[in-house]
Amino acid sequence: MAPSLVTSSVGHLPISQPSPVKALTTIIHQYHKDQTPQSTSLTPHWNTLVGQALNDLASSSVSFLVSDTPITSRDQLPAFTPTPFTPTRKRKHAVLDHQPETEHEHECHDALREAYEREDYYKGALYGMQSTAVLQEMYCKTLSSQLAAQEEKKLARKWEKLVGDGLPRLLTGDEFYHSVVDHNNVADAEVAVCESRRQERDKRASLMKAWKEEDTKWLERNEVCRQEYKEELRQWEEERAKAKVERRCMTHGKPKLGRLEAALPKPALTHIDEEEDESDDSEEEY
């Protein structure tokens, strides 16, 4: 069912907003209340209001925003609650159908039209704000999922301790036995992965060494070609100058630098090297 027409000048939110949103709403309302066209500075109690708002945020579900601790994937912003609006299709009040006769009626008609224009402008601004809030919520959810994946990847690299919390365990029990077996399997798999990565690094190091040697030879060959071209160009310029003096034509054209030898492609990074680079970047962030 479509929203009803505007029947009241007093607005209210059908759903209560979270406490962090209320804290910011209060301080924004106070700011606009204190600001006047003639005022050029904030009121003296503004610092008190800002401090109170920060305290309210620190004691709410978004305390991580005003804390020095790093943000984790468990930290979530309040869910955005969109506000329904009345239709924005063109309509006019019945009063505007009557032809104004007095100056006061003309002023009332103009004021009513300005009110309609102002309402359309505010609705358009609110539509843009809600659209921006939706996009930002999608962006934050994407970042949160990526941060959670990085945290899980970082925790997966750490071996789980079998005994470390001080609690008693039955060493001959099935539960502890299976834990030991799983722990050994994880350790063996980690050792195998490390060995595979070491072999890949050694292989790539040997390839890089051979590539650097060939690259050095390639630079030398191209440099020889450039030097020969410069020498031919110098001799040609001397012959051209001599031909001008003797008033004769050149028998051959200006020498050109031939196509140089293309460089050898550099050995590409393997998936193991790429994973190590990503893990190093993630560790630096933490």
Image: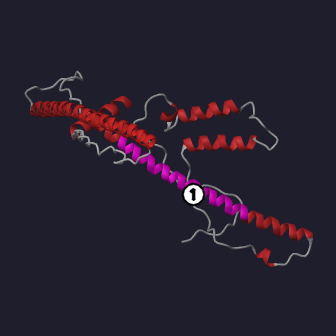
Relative to 18, 30 lies left or right: right
Name the residue tied to disc 1.
83
- Which residue lies most toward the top here? 166
Going by the image, does 194 lie left or right of 251?
A: left
In the rendered image, residue 15, in percent from the top left (x then y), is placed at: 55, 54
The part of the chain drawn in magenta is: 117-146
Front-most of 143 and 92? 143
Q: Which residue is situated farthest in the front direction here?
A: 246
Q: Main secondary structure of the magenta part?
A: helix
Question: Closer to the camera, 224 or 76?
Answer: 224
Q: Secondary structure at mark 1?
A: loop
The answer to whether residue 129 is seen in the rendering is yes
**Residue at 70% from the left image edge and 33% from the top image edge:** 46
8 vs 165: above or below: below
Would you say residue 121 sits in the magenta stretch? yes
Rendering coords of residue 24 (x, y %):
60, 41
Magenta highlight on residue 189? no
Place of residue 26 in the rendered image (x, y in percent of width and height, measured from the top left): 65, 42
Horizontally, residue 37 falls left or right of residue 90, namely right
From the image, which quarter does the C terminus lie in?
top left
* Count of marks overlaid on the render: 1
Whether residue 102 is situated above or below residue 8 in the rendered picture: below
Residue at position x 49%, y 45% in the image: 78
